[in-house]
Structures are given as structure tokens and as C-alpha cells.
Amino acid sequence: MIDGLAGRIGGSERKLLDLVYFTSDRYQGLVRAAGVWDRVGQVRLSCAAWLRAARWRDEPGDPAWGRAVACMRRDPGAGDWRSVMAYVLDRTPPERRAAAAAALDPPGPPLGAVAAPPVSDRPAGAPVPCDNGGNPR
């Protein structure tokens, strides 16, 4: 996490690869790596990790498929979310396809899209508190 937040992507990649390789449950390692890439803002690496995690188990009901689709919808250059959805729906039993399609492609904003938390609890337009030198605190 620290390497990723500092912009040392290569170092993060090596450490996350080790995390996945040495974790007893490879799927959980892949999910943790995808979460780290999400947190440090590396969308394409996150999409690839979510897709890798989903393909590891290759179960149509796995929530990692939804995360992969949502990630690819946020960054169209990361992959074709429609083909991933088609792949999952083809593997889903016919009686559950409608529910699976709704879960993978909900109406409204893409999965995982959350409003940014407020930067400050100071009301908009209120003066910024400063120290004696005029520097913001």
C-alpha cells in the first residue's frame, strides 16, 4: 500500500505478486491485491486483478465478477465489460440469468462508484483558519 501511494508501482506490483503467490488461498490473495490497486487509484491494474480473481474461481455468482465489470465500466480502456458479462451469463444457469444480469449491470451509476467523502466539515465559503503568518492551518 505504501509503495503504491508513493507512486512506486513496480515495487507494489512485486510485493502484491508475492502476496498472491505465498497466500494459502490464492483467490483471497488476488482479491486483496485488487483492493490495494483500487485504494491507490491504479484503475487498470485493479481491473486486471479483479478479473484474475473472478477467473480463478470461475463461479458465475462470485462478487468479483461484478467488481471487474464495474471497474471496466469506469475505465473503458481496461477491458470490454460487455464481453465479461456475456461470459458470466453464458455460464449462469438459465433460471438465474435475469438476476445475475441485474446484479452485474445495475441501473444507475456503475458498481463501486461512491461519492467522495467531504474534504472538510467547514461550510462552503467559510473563511479558512490561518496562523499568525497568514498560512492555512
Image: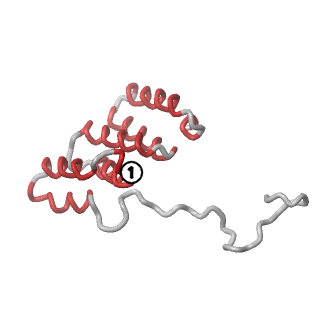
Type of amino acid at the residue the image marks with label 1? Asp
Residue ranking furthest to the front: 77
Identify the image quadrant of the N terminus.
top right
Q: Is mark 1 on a helix, strand or loop?
A: loop
Residue ranking furthest to the left: 94
Q: In the figure, is residue 4 to the left or right of 99?
A: right
- For the point 83% across and 62% down, the residue is 130
- Taking depth in this image into account, of 136 and 31 the one nearest to the observer is 136
123 in relation to 45, above or below = below
- For the point 56% across and 33% down, the residue is 8
Pointer 1: residues within 10 angstroms few (<14), some, or many (20+)? some
- Taking depth in this image into account, of 90 and 94 the one nearest to the observer is 90
103 in relation to 33, above or below = below
Q: Could you tell me residue 119's position as x and y percent?
A: 63, 61
Q: Could you tell me residue 65's position as x and y percent?
A: 28, 48
Identify the image quadrant of the C terminus.
bottom right
9 in relation to 40, above or below = above
To which quarter of the image does residue 32 belong? top left
- Taking depth in this image into account, of 104 and 81 the one nearest to the observer is 81
Residue ranking furthest to the right: 132
Q: In the figure, is residue 97 to the left or right of 40?
A: left
Q: Which residue corresponds to mark 1?
A: 75
- Taking depth in this image into account, of 22 and 71 the one nearest to the observer is 71
- For the point 79% across and 59% down, the residue is 136
Q: Could you tell me residue 83's position as x and y percent?
A: 21, 48
Q: Could you tell me residue 34's position as x and y percent?
A: 41, 41
- For the point 18% across and 47% down, the residue is 87
